[in-house]
Image (cartoon, rainbow, N blue to C red):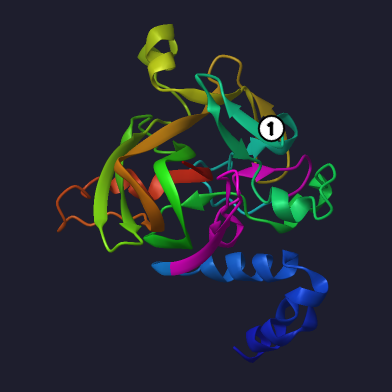
Amino acid sequence: LQACLDVQRSPLIAQPEKYGGRWQAIWQQHVNAHRRTQVIRIAVEQTGQADLTPAFNVYALTRDFVRYPNNLSSAREGYSFPEKRIADRIECPQHPQVVFHFPCLPLLSPDGGPSQRSDLEWFRTGLRIAGQKLDIEPRPARAVHLLAFNTTPERRRVKAQARILFADGRESVFPFEVPPWRQDEKTAADPLERRRLDPVLRDTEIHTANGAALNFPWAPFYMYHVALLLDSPGRVDEIYFPAADPTTAGLQDAGIGDVCIVALTLEE
């Protein structure tokens, strides 16, 4: 405990106005990775892209030849997506108005230049749902867009939900489904069904926890666009992703903990 307090008081973390927010964000996300329910302050750009860096708790995107903990999925090999194949600006093929940012982009490009991917190994790059509440500066929105996937071994869709709290005191619950990163044989053989799942990224190469790269051309991995359309436009204040709870209606799906959110964008 004393060692943690000493790190927290170190200038790199305690003085973000002098050293920037990079190390403070890294410290915060590594601490959050060991918590369950938490409230996390999230910044949102004028264009609607949220910086989820403080909320990330797993390594979803990794660099070549760098070892990472096996904590994204239950796969023994510790699969993760290779960052080199993902652009800084991620556009949805079927929804060109929806744009996501590469995770940690604001902190990897402090001067607005090209991202410094060599620094990525310091960062966790995915939010696995564990009951987090994202606190943002209230802003108008008519939809919340997620770049997400699930890692359930059954390769099925997972039912989850988001509770949106508005600045005027309203609260609404939005159920949604997240497709699997590895599709079953039936879906893989049906191009119309794959299109209905709304894929954004597809990759046959995958990283393992020891830094090696594997290629699965016959069973690619996917990330998807998931849209939460608000009943009526309003100023979104908080976004809460409840964890699985068998005693609560609508949250019985044990696979909620396997959902990974890589990016979030608010659409006005």
Q: Secondary structure at mark 1?
A: loop
Measured along the vertical axis of the image, is residue 82 above or below residue 160?
above
Residue 88 lies, in percent from the top left, at 71, 37
Measured along the vertical axis of the image, is residue 113 above or below residue 224?
below
- In this rendering, does residue 80 appear at all? no
How crowded is the residue under tag 1: few (<14 C-alpha within 10 Å), some, or many (20+)?
some
Residue 130 lies, in percent from the top left, at 39, 58
- In this rendering, does residue 58 appear at all? yes
Q: Could you tell me which quadrant the N terminus lies in?
A: bottom right
- At a point 50% along the width and 19% down the height, the residue shown is 94
In the image, taking residue 206 as reference, residue 268 lies left or right, namely: left
- At a point 75% along the width and 42% down the height, the residue shown is 63
- At a point 70% along the width and 88% down the height, the residue shown is 6
Please name whichever residue, 145 or 63, is drawn nearer the observer in this view of the structure. Answer: 145
In the image, taking residue 261 as reference, residue 161 lies left or right, namely: left
Give the total number of marks visible in the rendering.
1
In the image, taking residue 37 as reference, residue 56 lies left or right, namely: right
> Which quadrant of the view contains residue 30?
bottom right
- At a point 64% along the width and 88% down the height, the residue shown is 5
Please name whichever residue, 267 or 51, is drawn nearer the observer in this view of the structure. Answer: 267
In the image, taking residue 187 as reference, residue 136 lies left or right, namely: right
Residue 183 within the segment the image draws in magenta: no
Q: Which residues are magenta?
A: 39-67
List the single residue furthest toward the bottom: 2
> Which quadrant of the view contains residue 87?
top right
Please name whichever residue, 193 or 112, is drawn nearer the observer in this view of the structure. Answer: 112
Residue 152 lies, in percent from the top left, at 39, 38
In this figure, which residue is indicated by the disc labeled 1?
86
Residue 24 lies, in percent from the top left, at 69, 71
Amino acid type for the residue under numbered disc 1: Ile
